[in-house]
């Protein structure tokens, strides 16, 4: 299979099982940002992540790939790409609860930072929030129904990434970086 097809040279792209749309279409923006999030998580995995976090991030990367495929398909049910839903959301919530139970309660806001791995997980969290915003825009403008579970999934994922960044710092013995109110 060739990598380049030249079919997008005029600024449009084909949806899976659907029409061609502009590359800046809300649907493309949404799944493109999910793809970017997946790449940031791939970078985070190249740093020293605790042993219990790395396989979780790998699972999430696979789920994000599936979520992107679902968004790239105007009719996910017909094309069997509706793969992210309540089961994956429940798994994110369970992971949040498990890792948060190991952390000291927050008494103040923290800044992204600490270890390199934690900083990249914080970056992933911010990209996840952007993906969520892009998805909400798509939900509000799309003539096709977009599964509400996808917004919930990204919302929970950003919370989990925040907790995992803190857990990565804790595992490395590095404190979170407290926000200092300007004087």
Image (cartoon, helix red, strand yellow):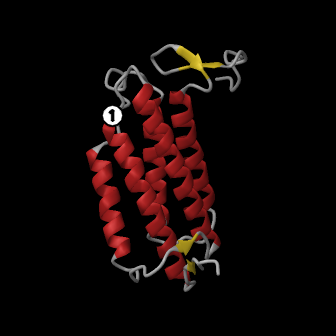
* Residue behind mark 1: 147
Instruction: In this rendered view, identify the residue nearer to me: 38 or 143.
Output: 143
Point out the residue furthest to the bottom here.
Answer: 173
Q: Is residue 45 visible?
A: no
Left or right? Give the position of 9 relative to 43: right
Tell me the residue at 64%/77% (across/down).
182
Taking the view exactly as shown, the residue that stands out farthest to the front is 183
Report how many numbered discs are placed on residues in the image: 1
Q: Secondary structure at mark 1?
A: loop
| Residue drawn at (50%, 81%) of the image | 170
Quadrant including the N terminus: top right
Q: Is residue 143 left or right of residue 124?
A: left
Q: Position of residue 178 (x, y in %)?
A: 56, 80
Task: Depth check: give the residue in front, 42 or 10.
Answer: 10
**Residue at horizontal 50 percent and vertical 64 percent from the top:** 54
Pick the front one: 66 or 1: 66
Q: Can I make out residue 91 in this image?
A: yes
As drawn, 136 above or below 42: above
Examine the rendered structure and indicate whether residue 163 appears above or below residue 105: above
Residue drawn at (56%, 25%) of the image: 25
Q: Residue 154 location in percent, x, y?
A: 42, 48
Residue 171 position within the rendered picture, expressed as x and y whole percent measured from the top left: 50, 81
Q: Residues within 10 Å of mark 1 (few under 14, many from 20)?
A: some
Residue 66: percent from the left, percent from the top? 43, 39
- Examine the rendered structure and indicate whether residue 66 appears above or below residue 5: below
């Amino acid at each position: 299979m060739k990598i380049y097809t030249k079919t997008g040279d005029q600024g449009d792209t084909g949806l899976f099982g659907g029409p061609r749309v502009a590359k800046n279409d809300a649907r493309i923006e949404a799944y493109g940002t999910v793809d970017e999030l997946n790449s940031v998580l791939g970078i985070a995995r190249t740093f020293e992540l605790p042993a219990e976090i790395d396989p979780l991030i790998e699972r999430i990367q696979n789920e994000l790939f599936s979520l992107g495929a679902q968004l790239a398909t105007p009719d996910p049910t017909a094309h069997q790409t509706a793969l992210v839903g309540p089961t994956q959301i429940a798994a994110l919530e369970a992971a949040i609860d498990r890792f948060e139970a190991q952390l000291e309660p927050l008494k103040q806001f923290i800044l992204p930072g600490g270890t390199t791995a934690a900083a990249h997980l914080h970056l992933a969290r911010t990209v996840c929030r952007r993906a969520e915003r892009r998805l909400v825009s798509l939900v509000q403008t799309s003539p096709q129904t977009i599964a509400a579970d996808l917004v919930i999934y990204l919302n929970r994922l950003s919370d989990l990434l925040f907790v995992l960044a803190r857990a990565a710092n804790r595992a490395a013995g590095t404190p979170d970086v407290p926000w200092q109110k300007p004087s």
